[in-house]
Amino acid sequence: MRSFFVPTILVSGALAARPFLNEPDTGLEQVLGNTAEGSLPDLTDMVGLPDFDWAARNYLPLQNYTYYRNGAAGEWSYRNNMEVFNRYNFIPSVMNDVTEIEDSLSTTILGHNFTAPFYISPCGSGIYGHPNAELNFVKGAAAGGILYIVGNYPSLLSYRANIPRPSGYASLSIEEIHAAKAQGQVVFQQLYLTKNDTETQDLFDRSKEAGADALVFTVDAPIFGTRQRAARLDVSLASSSYRYITWDYYKKLQSMTDLPIIVKGIMSVKDAKLAVKHKVPAIVLSNHGGRQLDGAPSALEVALEIYKKAPEVFEETEVYADGGVRYGTDALKLLALGVKAIGLGRPFMYSNVFGQEGVERAIALMKKELAVDAANLGLSDLKEIDASYVQWTHNDWSG
Ligand SMILES: Cc1cc2nc3c(=O)[nH]c(=O)nc-3n(C[C@H](O)[C@H](O)[C@H](O)COP(=O)(O)O)c2cc1C
Ligand SMILES: *[C@@H]1O[C@H](CO)[C@@H](O)[C@H](O)[C@H]1NC(C)=O
Ligand SMILES: *[C@@H]1O[C@H](CO)[C@@H](O)[C@H](O)[C@H]1NC(C)=O
Ligand SMILES: *[C@@H]1O[C@H](CO)[C@@H](O)[C@H](O)[C@H]1NC(C)=O
């Protein structure tokens, strides 16, 4: 393994008691540690989502891996996104019939049926992981029956499909990605927008024409974050201008399309309530995978604040969440607070190094974990989960 990415990073201050682990030691090094750099282990050797991070790091050129792995500044939010889940213990219940749990994973997202309450978060540049890029996510999501939200950088690419794109940035056009959908497959389209209404209208119309079932407006990235790990290698998609993102602008966007426009990147109770006020059909609690504002709270922390201070938000709009989810147990803690669906970004980007099959395996592993973890928590049906299954005060061993 490359020494640049020694997984253990000692941190100072209050967290010094426990080093941050990009991947906790679960014996992977002992079994796969001799895998030659630049080659992949067998897909069946991937037994959990963190394994895909290891495999991608070992296999991909440093720039490619760094584009995915990158977080903002000192990467405190990136790390916190993963560490936060272990600060809260479950309150398991025993003596319940859990034998039918696997039949209870299905859910709806904006009224569409899916086999599980998790989805592929929008991420740019699938081409860094596999030549088939985003096509693997479309097809993998179809095979697994889950939602895929297509990510895009239209402001960096020529926004018209027929103009050649600068190499190395986006992979495929909106049209090319949606054309790979299975019959009846539901896919949402994430967009970054400029203040140019002509371009915005064109993107909305193209997304609708291509068959997107909803749009996702990302509001936590008015300008790309301070990204040092990526800047070192010149893979930091630094945008040169500040994007215009306000509630008035959102209102205007709603008048430009009849597709629902989800708002992605809510990080406070105040903004969650404002989203409800502006009739947003769904919000995503997200700090962009810790890639934007270092120090921004994790989705779990925001969800907990909403649960305590404005629990009605979970009824008044659909609430999704992403960031740092690597285990079935992480997803359970978010579901417990009322989050309806959970996004995973990097795990799927990393799984893509194995192509569509890798994406399918990541989905299957996550489904299995969700079911097994829910059963061991004592749920007969995943929909029974609520906040009473988690101790919402910090445990004292997590540091
Ligand atoms: C490589 C990469 C590219 C991303 N690109 C986008 C994007 O184009 N649009 C967007 O809304 N979010 C983007 N995100 C954020 C993800 O949608 C999601 O919020 C984040 O990855 C969740 O954290 P996780 O990677 O720990 O699962 C990106 C994240 C990564 C890792
Ligand atoms: C979604 O699932 C429900 C309940 O199983 C079913 O009644 C409905 O027809 C499904 N909708 C679609 C579009 O498949
Ligand atoms: C790394 O990314 C480049 C795009 O910058 C891509 O052409 C190449 O195929 C990627 N490498 C791998 C192994 O996927
Ligand atoms: C908006 O975008 C269109 C299409 O790219 C372009 O022709 C037009 O000049 C732009 N308008 C402004 C004000 O930049």
Image: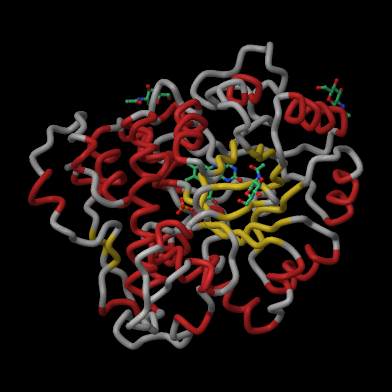
- Choose top left, top right, bottom left or bottom right for residue 376: bottom left
Question: Considering only vertical position in the picture, is 176 above or below 374?
Answer: above
Quadrant position of the C terminus in the picture: bottom left
Q: Which colour scheme is used?
A: secondary structure
* Residue displayed at 65% across by 50% down: 221
- Seen at 89% across and 51% down, the residue is 251
Residue 92 percent location from the top left of the image:
36, 82
Q: Quadrant of the N terminus?
A: top left
* Residue 323 image offset from top left, x and y in percent: 49, 58
Q: Is 74 positioned to the left or the right of 169 in the image?
A: left
Q: In this view, does 280 lie above or below 256?
A: below
Q: In this view, does 275 lie above or below 343?
A: below
Point out residue 336 in the picture as x, y percentages from the top left corner. 52, 73
* Total marks placed: 0
With 109 as the anchor, is 100 left or right in this view? left
Q: Residue at x 64, y 65 (%)?
A: 267
- Residue 300 visible in the snapshot: no
Residue 101 percent across, percent down from the top left: 41, 63
Asked if one can make out residue 399 in the rendered structure from this viewpoint, the answer is yes
| Residue depicted at x 30% and y 57% | 22
Left or right: 43 as drawn, with respect to 261: left
Q: In which quarter of the image is residue 128?
A: top left
Above or below 199: residue 361: below
Q: Nearer the viewer, residue 107 or 208?
A: 107
Nearer to me, 311 or 13: 311
Relative horizontal placement of residue 119, taking residue 259 as reference (left or right)? left
